[in-house]
Amino acid sequence: MTQLGVHAVRLTGGEPMARKGCLDLVEQLNSLPGIDYIAMTTNGILLKDCMEEAAKRGLNAVNISLDTLDACNFSRLTRNGHVEDVLKAVHEAVRCGLKVKINAVPVRDFNEEGLVAVAALAKDLPVDVRFIELMPVGCGAELRPIPMDEVRQRLEDAFGTMMTDETRHGYGPAGYMKPQGFKGSLGLIGAVSHEFCDRCNRVRITPEGILKLCLNHSAGLDLRALLRSGASDEEIADKMRDAILHKPVHHGFSEAVEDREQRRMNQIGG
């Protein structure tokens, strides 16, 4: 994939660090010519106490999932997790020089009253707090999203008018803002209410070796079958190029999709 121009890799899950040898994989990726950015989406708990090692192995950035600072809500969401552990991981990642982004998914009747508190983490810490619109994939289809326009209004009510932050924060679609006096920035990702499929630059490789082209479409390219069939690097590259050039034009969250994804987000590396 590096020959096709891929230079940034993100490890996702579920929880990537639950896989034994995850940091070995980081080191192997870091050794590939052409790969210059390695990030991980994580809850931070299993990375706690080894952020420095992760950075030495080649990890550049972490996106740490944190939907609420309320201890009871956090415990209910994570099935008895402790929010203090995640906050310690955030501070440790900052100390170790990793680029830190905090991901929160606003959900109606669950964490809407605590969104401002999560955003306030960017006031004293050099982190990006991003609010990601709930997508109707898997379990998400049973919950009620909060549109990004409403989230933005809540943030402006709390912090005042926010200036657009034009600095580069990574390779994703978030639009960033910076309230006055904040060390970090606030980001909004409105995949449903503000579709950005025409600018999508992501493909995923699932645990089964499928090159997945869109979160809401099950269609993809079976890389594992190609590798096991003895296909040449050139043949595999040609098939990947063709698949990526035919990514779905729209995710289709609000319309009928023939090959709609039925699996949960943590099964497809969302």
Image: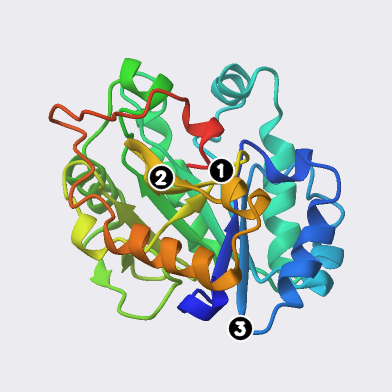
Left or right of residue 201: residue 34: right
Disc 3/disc 2 C-alpha distance (Å): 24 Å
Residue positioned 64% across, 54% down in the render: 227
Above or below 265: residue 247: below
Disc 3/disc 1 C-alpha distance (Å): 22 Å
**Front in this rendered view, residue 21 or 170:** 21
How far from the left and from the top, in percent, is residue 38?
63, 68
The crowding category of the residue bearing disc 2, from other C-alpha atoms within 10 Å (few below 14, some 14 to 19, many at least 20), is many
Report helix, strand or loop for mark 3: loop
Report helix, strand or loop for mark 1: loop
**Front in this rendered view, residue 197 or 76:** 197
Above or below 161: residue 218: above
- Amino acid type, residue under disc 1 in the picture: Thr
Above or below 210: residue 196: below
How far from the left and from the top, in percent, is residue 21?
85, 50
Q: Check if mark 3's residue and mark 2's residue have beta carbons within 8 Å.
A: no
Find residue 206 and name its label.
Answer: 1
Find residue 220 and name its label.
Answer: 2
The crowding category of the residue bearing disc 1, from other C-alpha atoms within 10 Å (few below 14, some 14 to 19, many at least 20), is some
Residue 217 in sight here: yes
Label 3 vs 1, first from the N-terminus: 3
The quadrant of the rendering that contains the N terminus is bottom right
**Front in this rendered view, residue 153 or 222:** 222
The residue to which callout 3 is attached is: 34
Q: Check if mark 2's residue and mark 1's residue have beta carbons within 8 Å.
A: yes
